[in-house]
Image: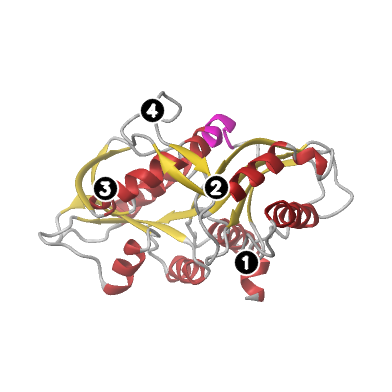
Amino acid sequence: MARNSQLKRALWHDYRSSCRYMITLSRRRDFPPLSVIEGDPQLPAGTRGSCRTRWSHTGKKIADLIYNMSAIHPALRADQYVVMPDHVHILLWVQSPLPEHLGFYIARFKNAVNLAAGENHVFEDGFNNQIVTSKRDLNTLFAYIRDNPRRLAVRRACPDFFNRRDSVNIAGHACMVYGNIHLLDNPFKEQVVVHRADSPEVLSRNKETWLYTAANGGVLVSPFISQAEKAIRNEAEATGGKIILVTHEAFPDRYKPAAHDFELCTQGRLLIISLGYPSCTPLARDTCLSMNNLAHTIAATFKSE
């Protein structure tokens, strides 16, 4: 538990500094839903009749407090948010340096929610955070938050969308996919690739970034070929991380992943993407490069269609 809590904080980052964060708060499991999803999942987010959230009494209190986030501290502003049935996303802008660690103000916000709702614990302990660096497109984050209700509605209405599809255009490749295709939409994806020339310092720094990303709801993308890459995957999965696994071999008829991967797929934590090579294709250097190039493109830009 302590290890997981440590991974949820970027040890290289000053949480008192001016910065934007994607904050995620999870509803306590035995607490009633914070909202319900209404609308047509076939319509684009933001259009008339499209999916939206209808807040519960507590959900409305949460939304009001997010809107008035500056009451927690004048430097805090919510650029965008969504109150989902079981979690809350807040794109939080810390406009000027804080006198206390960010966690202090998140705790104050959660306490304010409890008081407004007349409850002891609306949320689970702790919070997830993703640091929004300059390489992140804010419009992409806005769209991701707006689209949360539609994605949940699609998942409920179309469970087959989370299984096998034999022809999906990914970065110009006709790929086979199995698992949660919505992982492609996650704006916080990181490619995992370990080079032989990596120094221990570089590997340690990269590992810290990857595990921080995974522990806070991001997605790790890789073929996970080397033992070092596989070790990263295992450690990320142990903290509840999500994985996009790139492979080269085509799925055979009646394909179903091995037991471990199948369980991750049922949990919505794994997407397997195949380049569709014949099963007898050797794992040569060019093949590995193709998989790593696709992983790089997915982590950098790709969204599902």
Residue 69 location (% of width, % of height): 75, 40
In the rendered structure, the answer to whether residue 40 lies left or right of residue 114 reads left
- SS type, badge 2: loop
> What residue is shown with label 3?
158
> What residue is shown with label 4?
49
Q: Sequence-wise, which precedes: disc 3 or disc 2?
A: 2
> What residue is shown with label 2?
56
Q: Sequence-wise, which precedes: disc 2 or disc 4?
A: 4
> Does the CB distance between marks 1 and 2 fall below 8 Å?
no
Q: Which residues are magenta?
A: 136-142
Q: Sequence-wise, which precedes: disc 3 or disc 4?
A: 4
Where, quadrant-wise, is the C terminus in this rendering? Answer: top left
Q: Is residue 260 above or below residue 246?
A: below
Q: Residue flagged by tag 4: what amino acid is it?
A: Gly
Task: Calculate the distance from the C-alpha at mark 4 to the C-alpha at mark 1.
Answer: 53 Å
Disc 1 vs disc 3: which is toward the camera? 3
